[in-house]
Amino acid sequence: MNDTLYKTLGVSRSATQSDIKKAFRKHMKALHPDLNPGDAAKEAKFKKVSAANDLLSDPEKRALYDRGEIDENGADVAQNPFGGGARGQQHGSQGYGDMGDMFSQMFGGGGQRGGFQQAFKGQDQRYNMQVSFTEAALGGDKQIHLADGSAVNVRIPKAIESGQTIRLKGKGHPGQNGGPAGDALIEVKVATHPVFNRDGLDIEVILPITLYEATLGGKVEVPTLHGAVGLKVPAGTNSGKVLRLKGRGVEKGRMKGDQLVRLQIHLPEKVDAKLQTFMQEMQESSPYDPRQKLKGKANV
């Protein structure tokens, strides 16, 4: 019992006519010479697949083949085992020249090999673009040069992050046979900022304050994405305290982040004798231990 044609199509002997048709369509899409110009190996395999389909897709021929009365070439085994019989001439494969109708239905092309004009979308073209921290947060426009040398303006959406991609439709490689052009895919890298850090839609900034601002409290100026604003520092503030500026972060649609201001006490660059004396007097008159809560907890 010969299974050669079934193996060629990749189906079992019990396959239905629908199974055979689906298998052949799959092979056509992968192997057809018009889709693989110059690939001799795929063209040779396609001829074998076409011959197998030509026989197995015909119920009468398939029945003769299953009973062993004809071989995989359609030749009458009983009359001429070497393939020269009259039935062999009647049932022989017609190759892929007569499959235009099926190929046309699948791809919308011409009815003959060589006349098929399947439209293909062009390949996408990938680019990298660095944007500033502020451009990524607030959005904006930036010019980029494509592979063909042309310059295009790229609209940077608000709140974009490193690794995200901007798509320029139709700015990739041209299509084939009238197909649409591919797209330009621009991967964004956001530069760091000397003052701001970003966490999602929130902006973080470390704000240095003086010893007397931390002790006495007061109003200080804080930089934000939209310019400087005033911030009230409570009296008795410690380094590390975080104050929140509502709505001063990154905006994305209807959502808006905050700005988180982390206070950091800075001493003068030069501690003079007057300050030293004052601190010594304070140490003697008002001693305190800020590390008291840590004692006995290190080994827990």
Image (cartoon, grey):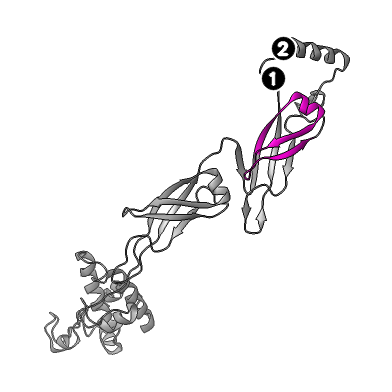
Where is residue 249 shown, x and y percent of the image? Answer: 65, 47
Q: Which of the 4 image quadrants contains residue 283?
A: top right
Element type at marker 2?
loop
Where is residue 262 shown, x and y percent of the image? Answer: 70, 35
Q: How many marks?
A: 2
Residue 297: in sight, yes or no? no
Asked if the residue at tag 2 contacts the one at tag 1, i.e. Cβ–Cβ closer than 8 Å, the answer is: yes
Q: Is residue 55 above or below residue 164?
A: below
Q: Amino acid at mark 2?
A: Asp
Q: Is residue 248 left or right of residue 11?
A: right
Magenta-highlighted residues: 205-233
Element type at marker 1?
loop
Q: Which residue is mark 2?
A: 272
Q: Is residue 266 left or right of residue 2?
A: right
Residue 197: in sight, yes or no? yes
Q: Is residue 14 magenta?
A: no
Q: Amino acid at mark 1?
A: Pro
Distance between the Cα atoms at labels 1 and 2? 9 Å
Viewer-side residue, 117 vs 295 = 117
Viewer-side residue, 281 vs 173 = 281
Quadrant of the frame with the N terminus: bottom left
Q: Local crowd at mark 1 within 10 Å, few (<14), some, or many (≥20)?
A: few
Viewer-side residue, 288 vs 32 = 288
Viewer-side residue, 181 vs 10 = 181
Q: Which residue is mark 1?
A: 268
Where is residue 247 shown, x and y percent of the image? Answer: 70, 49
Quadrant of the frame with the C terminus: top right
